[in-house]
Each structure stands twice: as C-alpha cells, then as structure tokens.
Amino acid sequence: MASAEIYNKALDLLSRREHSRKELFLKLINRFESQEEINLTLDKLEGKNLLSDSRFAEEYVQARRKKGFGPIKISAELDPMGSIQKGGMRLFRGFKTGFQNQFLRRNHPKGVDPWTCFRVLRSFSIL
C-alpha cells in the first residue's frame, strides 16, 4: 500500500514539472519513511522514462537561459540537484546569442566594454 502511495505522489509531483531524481527523493522522504521503497519507486519511474535527470537539466537550463542567466550561474544551481553530471556542458551551447544582443542595446557604464559588463552581470566567464 505504501509503495502505491509513494508512486502516486511521485507522479503527482512529476505532472507539475520535471524533477531531478535527487530533488524528487528529498520531497518524497519528507512524506514517507521508507528510503528503500522510495528508491524502488524512482527506479520504476526511470525505467518507464517518466523521471529523467537529463531531461530535467535540459528544461531547467532553457528556462533559466530565457531569464538571462549565464552558464556559470545555472551550473551552480544545477550542481546541488545532482543533474549537471548527466547533462554535461552540451547544455550550454549557444549562450552567446539572444539575450546578449538585447543587453548590448541597453545603456552601460562609460569606459566599460559592454561584453565584459554583460558577462559579469550574468555570470559568464570573462576570460
């Protein structure tokens, strides 16, 4: 009975948005006591491709990228969630387009290179 409740709660959480395995485990452990049953449920969800760390990481990067955050900030946010290892740096391809062009059209301090200003403000590497 408890495993069915765990499974249903996990599906409920996943129906709202993608979660990393670690994030979902932490949410479920607050409600249920059995770590073993939670891990079995998470394995079952991964087997059915309902839970995917790489899919979570891809969606998370895209959402944060649309808000204008850089790869350093995003990878720092993903690291505690345990998802960055599976996604790797391929998630951060194409970061030098889109939002950077919008930023360069805005005013920036005189005497400061607009690219440097952008990279510092958005956690991009300035090297």
Image (spheres, rainbow, N blue to C red):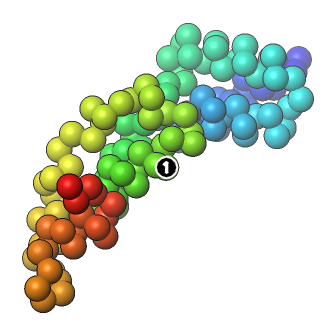
- The residue depicted at 11 percent of the width and 75 percent of the height is 113
The spot of residue 7 in percent (x, y) is 72, 23
The answer to whether residue 54 of the structure is visible from this angle is no
Assign a secondary structure to mark 1.
Answer: helix
Quarter residue 127 falls in: bottom left
Q: Is residue 67 above or below residue 107?
A: above
Q: Is residue 13 above or below residue 117?
A: above
- The residue depicted at 54 percent of the width and 24 percent of the height is 51
The residue positioned farthest toward the front in the image shown? 127
Q: Is residue 114 above or below residue 94?
A: below
The spot of residue 122 in percent (x, y) is 31, 64
- The residue depicted at 84 percent of the width and 38 percent of the height is 31
- The residue depicted at 28 percent of the width and 57 percent of the height is 124
Count the labels in the image: 1
Q: Is residue 30 above or below residue 117?
A: above
On the rendered structure, is 28 left or right of 69?
right
Quarter residue 97 falls in: bottom left
User: Which residue in the protein does label 1 denote?
Assistant: 77
Q: Nearer the viewer, residue 111 or 99?
A: 111
On the rendered structure, is 90 left or right of 78?
left
On the rendered structure, is 51 left or right of 65?
right
**Label 1 CA crowd tier, 10 Å (few <14, some 14–19, many 20+):** some
Q: Amino acid at mark 1?
A: Glu
The spot of residue 4 in percent (x, y) is 79, 19
Quarter residue 100 falls in: bottom left
On the rendered structure, is 45 left or right of 68?
right
